[in-house]
Image: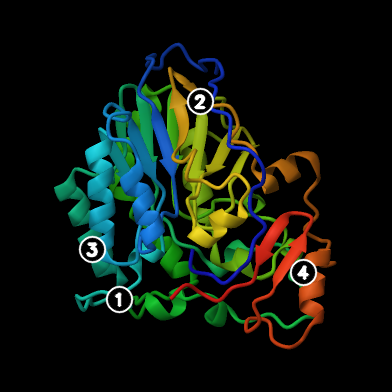
């Protein structure tokens, strides 16, 4: 995740992993016990602690399993290749879709023309490693990577006013460390549309998967719905929704899983580093981020001991990943985006005008421990 926002992450115990029975929506679909499918996002293995976690995953446990990686593997191509090579040694199938950090250019030894050229190089590396970047069926389970990028118009909820909020360019490093052709631009609709168009070349495969598979897991790095992020008044950086998601992505997801969804529909995403597990309009949306080392220290359920999350096993999806503080919160409380009264922990922060980004206090609030920190270097 590139943006400077400071979240109250998940709390308490590791998630349950028991499977539940999901009814088959159609007799015409493939029926199989299938493989185990594990999911994870936001690995950020430029941090030595995160690379150590990748290395520590047992090799013998996952020889027949699938791993879905929902973006932000590493900032440098070298660390990306190392990480994915380790995963490929441990898992039979590894699927990947790019995130924003994967396309950063600031530390590369190669002078890429732009971030699109780096994307091509990463996909080429995946091909050599045997990492899968196209839709595929694995033992009856449909796995569909969806390319995406965020656009500012994704945010349709009421803005917070009356406090000084840093600009997107100041708060999001993507504006400085990604480089795009002149006709595209970070945060613009044109860039989101371009990434969405990359899915067209594989759409015949997607349509075949939809016809054949009773269980389908689609996945992206970015967020398809604004409801998958806390309301602006809850966030230390209230403009976060402008740099996290894509409307075009949700349209793709609905074309796969149906306008009403189904009990066998699941979409995995990443980017915001919030653990999340919720059903919206019949589709289950899951985020299982490793995140930065400092964030895991503040999460009571950490991440090292239960990630990657087993999303699918023995022909069924897993029970809810729990606890996930924010999705659990919204399962019990209505979303009220028209309410712009800052949450108490944000209000205390905003009331101090010494500088929004410069200070780094620790704030104790009802959602655990949240620290305001500068961007990772």
- Mark 4 vs mark 1, CA separation in Å: 34 Å
In the picture of the structure, the residue carrying the numbered disc 1 is 107
Classify 41 as above or below 46. above
Indicate which disc, 2 or 1, sits on the residue closer to the N terminus. 1
Q: Nearer the viewer, mark 3 or mark 2?
A: 3
Q: Is residue 153 left or right of residue 42?
A: right
Q: Which mark is residue 78?
A: 3
In front of the other: 323 or 316: 323
Tally of marks: 4
Quadrant of the image occupied by residue 341: bottom right
How many residues crowd around disc 2 within 10 Å: few (fewer than 14), some, or many (20 or more)? many
Q: Which mark is residue 346?
A: 4
Cβ–Cβ under 8 Å for marks 3 and 1: no
In the picture of the structure, the residue carrying the numbered disc 2 is 317
Indicate which disc, 3 or 4, sits on the residue closer to the N terminus. 3
What is the residue that sits farthest to the left in this orientation?
128
Residue 114 location (% of width, % of height): 28, 75
- Mark 3 vs mark 2, CA separation in Å: 34 Å
Classify 38 as above or below 64. below
Q: Is residue 225 left or right of residue 248?
A: right
Q: Which mark is residue 331?
A: none
- Mark 3 vs mark 1, CA separation in Å: 10 Å
- Mark 2 vs mark 4, CA separation in Å: 36 Å
Element class at badge 1 = loop
Q: Please tell me which residue is depicted at 45% across the width and 27% down the height of the picture.
A: 312
Element class at badge 3 = helix
- Residue 289 can be seen in this image: yes
How many residues crowd around disc 1 within 10 Å: few (fewer than 14), some, or many (20 or more)? few
Indicate which disc, 3 or 2, sits on the residue closer to the N terminus. 3
Indicate which disc, 2 or 4, sits on the residue closer to the N terminus. 2
Residue 91 location (% of width, % of height): 28, 35
């Amino acid at each position: 995740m590139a943006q400077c926002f400071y979240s109250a992450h998940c709390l308490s115990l590791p998630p349950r992993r028991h499977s539940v029975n999901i009814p088959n929506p159609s007799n015409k679909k493939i029926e199989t016990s299938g493989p185990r499918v594990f999911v994870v996002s936001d690995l950020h293995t430029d941090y030595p602690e995160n690379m150590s976690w990748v290395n520590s995953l047992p090799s013998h446990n996952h020889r027949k399993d699938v791993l879905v990686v929902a973006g932000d593997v590493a900032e440098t191509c070298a660390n990306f290749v190392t990480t994915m090579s380790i995963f490929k040694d441990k898992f039979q199938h590894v699927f990947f879709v790019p995130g924003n950090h994967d396309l950063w250019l600031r530390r590369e030894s190669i002078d890429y023309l732009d971030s699109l050229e780096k994307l091509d190089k990463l996909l080429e590396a995946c091909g050599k490693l045997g990492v899968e970047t196209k839709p595929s069926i694995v033992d009856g389970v449909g796995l569909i990577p969806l390319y995406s990028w965020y656009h500012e118009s994704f945010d349709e909820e009421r803005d917070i006013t009356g406090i000084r909020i840093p600009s997107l360019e100041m708060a999001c490093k993507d504006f400085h460390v990604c480089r795009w052709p002149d006709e595209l631009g970070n945060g613009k609709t044109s860039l989101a549309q371009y990434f969405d168009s990359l899915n067209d070349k594989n759409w015949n495969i997607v349509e075949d998967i939809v016809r054949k598979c009773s269980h389908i897991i689609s996945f992206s790095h970015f967020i398809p719905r604004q409801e998958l992020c806390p309301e602006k008044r809850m966030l230390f950086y209230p403009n976060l929704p402008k740099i996290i998601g894509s409307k075009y992505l949700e349209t793709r997801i609905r074309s796969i899983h149906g306008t009403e969804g189904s009990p066998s529909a699941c979409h995995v995403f990443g980017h915001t580093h919030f653990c999340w597990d919720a059903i919206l309009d019949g589709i289950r949306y899951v985020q299982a981020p490793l995140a930065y080392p400092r964030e895991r220290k503040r999460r009571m359920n950490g991440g090292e001991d239960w990630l990657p999350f087993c999303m699918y096993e023995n022909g069924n999806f897993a029970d809810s990943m729990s606890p996930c503080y924010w999705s659990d919160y919204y399962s019990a409380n209505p979303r009220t985006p028209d309410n712009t009264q800052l949450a108490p922990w944000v209000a205390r922060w905003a009331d101090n005008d010494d500088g929004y980004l410069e200070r780094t206090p620790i704030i104790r609030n009802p959602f655990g421990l949240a620290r305001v920190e500068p961007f990772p270097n």
